[in-house]
Every structure is written in structure tokens, then in C-alpha cells.
Amino acid sequence: MTSQTVDDLSARLAAPLGAAFADLGLDPALGQAQRAQKPEFGDFQCNGALAGAKAAGRNPREVAAAVAGRLAGHGLIERVEVAGPGFLNITLSADAVTDQARLLAADPRSGADCVANPRRVVVDYGGPNVAKPMHVGHLRAAIIGESLKRIARHRGDTVWGDAHFGDWGYQMGLLIMAVREEQPDLPYFDAGFTGPYPEESPVTLADLDRLYPLASARGKADPEVRDAARKATAELQAGRPGYIALWKHFVVVSRAALVRDYGTLGVAFDLWLGESDADPLIPGMVADLEERGLLQDDAGARVVFVHEKITRRKDGSEGPDLPPLLVVSSEGSAMYGTTDLATILYRVRELGAEQCLYVVDKRQGDHFEQVFRAADKAGYMPRAALEHIAFGTMNGTDGRPFKTRDGGVLKLADLIATVTAAATAKIEEAGVGRDLPEAERQDIALKVGMAALKFADLQNFRGNDYVFDLDRFLSFEGKTGPYLLYAAVRIKSILRKAAEQGLEPGPITVDHPAERKLVMALDGYATALRGAHDKRAPHHLAEHCYALASTFSGFYTACPILGSDGAVRASRLALAALTLTQLEAALDLLGIAVPERM
Ligand code: ARG
């Protein structure tokens, strides 16, 4: 159930359709109509007569004809036809379409409805790590997560976007040891030092960028380095003051750079909680799990068994459908899953969260399933309130996961720079913004680049892989971000010209078929938004933006706006203004910002 300011046409049709079914002694819920698949079928199609006749043992065509008879003369409806085995093809009256356009134009949310029962939701969509550069997996999480956060919030949920900063693992120990090797005389390493520790960081971002890959490689190659790093990690986690003080500098330096990169992407987290913030809850949680007999021994480690059944594996052997969640390793340390489980407790206790959405690469599916089942088993949060919003990989044109030219992992900051540079070249070549000041042109290039990148991602179902093809993403034609920006900016320019000439929008009257098409497109917004929210799938909304922009373009070709007169011009101006408001709002929900001019 949803509550909304403006019912869409399908909801408005459900009333007379439902009443007609009820008149025949059938369930009014049969009166649901969907958009017609083809224009020759009218505007809406209702298949209720088929199901209703089957349930009542009647002839479907007769039921359909009886429903059609009862709808004749209703103000919303121009014509109802019975087709095939008993489909109802419904054409709306011109008045109904005009009326709907006026309702949408008067609605500040231009048709977007709200959920009936708002929830308190955490969207966990960052997952960047201290000192490790962000890569394209983090990019997809940021783009999809930011959009889902905005969508849920727009529909009335209370939402926190949480970065879930990776600030507490083994890489911290690696870094501590790497700094120690370069600057052994710093007070952080002197166990007898009583403070205070220096306020200024002994490392810059460039230092972290340089130190981490080296330390990581050495840790892999040299067991001594690895053991020292593990020991440092354990000491950090146990609260050794010098290590904590040094670690805080890593966090601050890293986070500042991440906030900047996310900012360029138009991504802002409400919470910058780290894995470390869940750490204080871990001892109590482990004790609680022990006490309730949920922790079991598994080769020296403490685990929660989370399998639901025994299944046959690919190799023919049989085993549990999911391995246990590792809570305390045989060496006594907390693991990735331990932190995620404790973080759920944190979110429930501190935020009153009722739902957690994890926007993370689909390869982490098993991990989340383990955590979710354990949380459910422990009664921390029901399984149904925990969702892994999995996404596929962004591939290179060779069809393999996107890499840099030399085969390395592409840093997010470099990707952003590449996209912005290509967008700058593109708008120069297209002559976009030629007469505008340099600063504005730069802003346009950034917006075009980000729109290209984001729309290319969000137009696909998130679970699918897609190919990074910058040339195609940046095209001003076709289903692209730049095309949508261009469409929105063109409407802005029409409205600006109208205002300069003192022309005002007026009451909408739908007359021309292209006007009618445009209103039908505008009316699809609520369904698209609901689909995006309910299915956690922004591509529904992306699809709507594209349909709206291209329908507007058809309207603009067929129906002169400034070139018409009087009430027609005022009506068309109002249609253009409504289209812009809705398009800009929908793009904003995708995280895409529209420039004023281009
Ligand atoms: N830091 C992790 C990574 O880079 C992602 C974290 C995802 N979120 C979570 N709650 N586990 O792979």
C-alpha cells in the first residue's frame, strides 16, 4: 500500500474497473490495469476478466463484455474494447489526460508517491579502505548506493548512508610497521612514551599511497613481515596508545582524500563510521553468542553454523549449503564477518535501524548470506530486513574486468580524471558552451562526465556486468547521460526565453497526440520510482528518464511552443515546465546534476 498526493492513471482507473468487477460479484482487485503494450491497444490493458471468469466458472469474453458495458460513459474512459480471449483494452478520455496533466503540474513532487510505512534504513555502500586506493568496484557501489539512498529517502524512509570505512584490519598493522621502518624514532613506537603525541600527521596521503602497496607486497612474500604486521594489528586492536594515535592519523589523512573523491562523484555519506566503530561491541557480542550456545568449535575457531540444508555439490560430494560464519579465529582475532555482525548490533542499538541494505559486489554474496543468517539466528535483526544489493562487474572493451593499460587496478581518482578530460574534449568538439565563461565550461564538463559515467551504470540492471566504453557513454545521442542533460538544458533554455518575453505558463489542455504521449510518459514516473525502490533497481528510474526525454523531444518537434499563441502556448509552456521539474527530480535521484546552460 502506498499513500500518494497524486494517484497515477492506473490507480485512478482501478476504482471504476474494480467497481465493475464487484458489480458482477467478482473480486474488485481484478480491476488492475497495466499500460498497453502497443498503441493500437489503447492506453491500458486489464486482464482481470480472464482470472475472474476462471475462478467463477464463467466465460471470460462474457465477463469482459459485461465489465466493458459497465464502464461505458465513465468520465475517465473514452472507449473499452474486448480483445482475444477476454482482455480489456482501454482508451482514456481526453479530459482524463488533461486532468492528470494538471494534477501533476500542481504537485510539488510531480507525481512521486511516498511509502505508507516509512522505515529506518541504513544503506551501506562505500566500503573504501584506509590507504588502499578505491577501484571500480567501489565506484559501482557508490553510484548505485547513492541512488538507492536518495530514492528511499524521497519515498519517505529515514535513511543513513554509511561509508563503512575499512579502517581496522591487517592493512593497519602493515602500515604501522612500514612507517616504523622509515621513521623508527617517532614516539608512536616507544612503548614507554606517555604522550601527548604530535598533532601533525607523520605521513601524507602520498606517503600512504607509496607505503601501502610496498608493504602489502612484502607481507605476501615475507612471513616475517606478515607476522610482525599481524602482531601490530593485534596490539592496535588491544588499544596500544602509540599505535592508536598513529592509526588516527592514517584514518584522518585517508578519509579526507576519500571524501574529496566521493564529492567529485556527487556522493556524500551521512555517516563515516568505520569497522573500528563496531569493535567495542565485539567482546560483549561474542560473550552473548557463547552464553546462548550459538558459538561452536570448528578446528580451533569459534563459528556460528548457518547452513540450512545439506546439498549435493558440483563434484558430487554432499555438504552444508553454506560454510559457518567465522567469529573468532583460532588465533583469537575478530574477522571481517565478526565486524559486520557487530555493526548490525550497532545500527540497531544506536540508530534504531529496521533494515540494512548492503550495496556490494556480487562476489561477496556468500559472506553476506553468512552474516545475515547469523544475525537472524542470534535475534539481532530478522533475515528479511537484511539485503545484499549485489552488482556485477564493469568490464573493459575486451570483456574482462576493467584494468589499467598496464594491467593494474584502476584508481578511482584516475578514472574520474580520465572521464572529466574526455568530457572536456567532447564538449569542445561539439561546441557546447562555446560562449560561456571558462569556469562554467569546466563545471559543465564535470557534470557531463559524471552523467555519462553514472547513467551508463544505472541504465543496466545492477546485477549485470557491463562494458566501460567512454566514447559511447559520452555521446550526445542515444541512451546516455549527456543526451539527458542536453534534453533538460534545452527545456531550461525554452523556459528562459519565454520568461524573457514575459510569457507565462497557463492551464494545460491536452489536444495534440504528441501532447497526449508526453502526459502519458509523465504519468509513468510513480510506477518507475516504486519499481526502483521496491526492487532496489535504479534502472527502472533511468529507463523512465530516457523515455521522458525522448518523448519530450517528439513533442517539441511536433508542437511548437514559443511559435504558438495564447492558451496553446501557455499550456505547452506548462507541459515543458512540468517535464523539466520531473526530469530534474528523477535525474537527481540517480545522482545526476543538470547544468543551467550548455
Ligand atoms: N571494505 C570492503 C572492500 O573493500 C567492502 C565493505 C563492504 N561492506 C560491508 N559491510 N562489508 O571489499
Image (cartoon, helix red, strand yellow):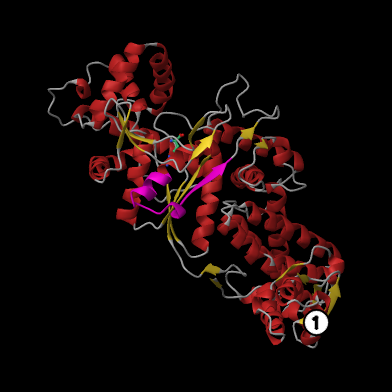
Residue drawn at (46%, 48%), measured in percent from left and top?
268
**Mark 1 element type:** helix
Report crowding for label 1: few under 14, some 14 to 19, many 20 or more residues within 10 A (C-alpha). many
Q: Nearer the viewer, residue 36 or 432?
A: 36
Identity, as a three-letter code, of the amino acid under mark 1 = Ala
Query: Total of numbered circles in the picture?
Result: 1
Q: Which residues are magenta?
A: 372-391
Residue 384 counted in the magenta span = yes
Q: Is residue 489 left or right of residue 334?
A: right
* Residue 479: x %, y % from top left: 74, 48
In this rendering, the answer to whether 58 lies above or below 365 is below
Q: Is residue 140 left or right of residue 206?
A: right
Residue drawn at (46%, 66%), measured in percent from left and top?
118
Determine if residue 265 is in view: no
Q: Which residue is mark 1?
A: 68
* Residue 502: x %, y % from top left: 70, 74
- Please state the quadrant of the image where ligand 1 appears: top left
Residue 559 counted in the magenta span = no
In this rendering, the answer to whether 170 lies above or below 416 is above
Residue drawn at (39%, 23%), measured in percent from left and top?
207
Q: Nearer the viewer, residue 102 or 142?
A: 142
